[in-house]
Image: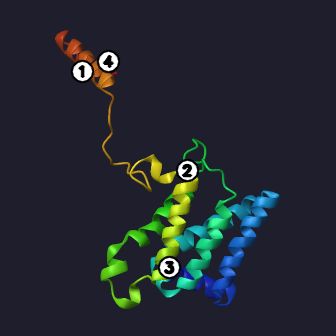
Amino acid sequence: AVAGRIVAREFGGEWAGLLTEMRLAFLAFLLVFSLPALEQWKAVVDLLCQCDALMCEQPTLYAEFLALLQAQLTHAPTDLFTDALSRENFLESALVGLFDALDDDSRLADGPADAALPRSLRDALARFKDFVENRFGWGARGDGFGDDEDAPVVVPESEAARERRRAETAAGKGEVGSEAFR
């Protein structure tokens, strides 16, 4: 709904205008290091990655979007999602939203016929996901896309044992201050 209003207002209802905007913004950033152009590119990419319903309504647009985004991401460093300075960037959450459509079984199989993604778009999404995994090593980080901040944390045994000894020592001395938990 939001994307449709933007395209109607800014591009006269022509979806191709949105992809042209994405191309121009990327080129302006790449060639002249324009920060406003980067922000515009990010806004277009994020918008298209989060519009699940639009994928069903405009599958041709999304196939073109995926091809364009893949071509643009070939200019990104391969450590885009693992480097300390660039990881956890907007693109990670945007792509998680995009790939959720691929993994959403209710939309792909059990949903109403008009809500199902066409096979060609599912295949294009799968190829794009493979590209991202292979180029950026995204799947190698663990269980796949998006780190779950609520996931269990593995504490090395030596650290756990050290904390337990400190707590036992402090308890044996009658200490119950913050020193016991450092």
Q: Position of residue 63 (x, y in %)?
A: 57, 78
- The CA distance from mark 4 to mark 1 is 13 Å
* Front label number (2 vs 4): 2
Q: Do the residues labelled 1 and 2 touch (CB within 8 Å)?
A: no
- Residue at the disc numbered 1: 164
Give residue 112's quadrant in the image.
Answer: bottom left
Give residue 69's quadrant in the image.
Answer: bottom right
Q: Are marks 4 and 3 in contact (CB under 8 Å)?
A: no
- The CA distance from mark 2 to mark 4 is 37 Å
Q: What residue type is labelled 1?
A: Arg
- Residue at the disc numbered 4: 179
Answer yes or no: is residue 89 visible.
no
Farthest right residue in view: 32
Label of residue 121 in the image: 3
Residue at image position (42%, 51%) is 147
- The CA distance from mark 4 to mark 3 is 58 Å
* Front label number (1 vs 3): 3
Q: Are marks 3 and 2 in contact (CB under 8 Å)?
A: no
* Front label number (4 vs 1): 1
Answer few, some or many: residues within 10 Å of disc 4's Cα (few below 14, many 20 plus, some between 14 and 19): few
Label of residue 81 in the image: 2
Lower sequence index among marks 4 and 1: 1
Lower sequence index among marks 4 and 3: 3
Q: Where is residue 64 in the image (x, y as percent from the top left)?
A: 62, 78
* Front label number (4 vs 3): 3
Residue at image position (70%, 58%) is 75
Q: What element carries label 4?
A: helix
Lower sequence index among marks 3 and 2: 2
- The CA distance from mark 3 to mark 2 is 25 Å
- The correct choice, above or below, for 6 with respect to 177 in the image is below
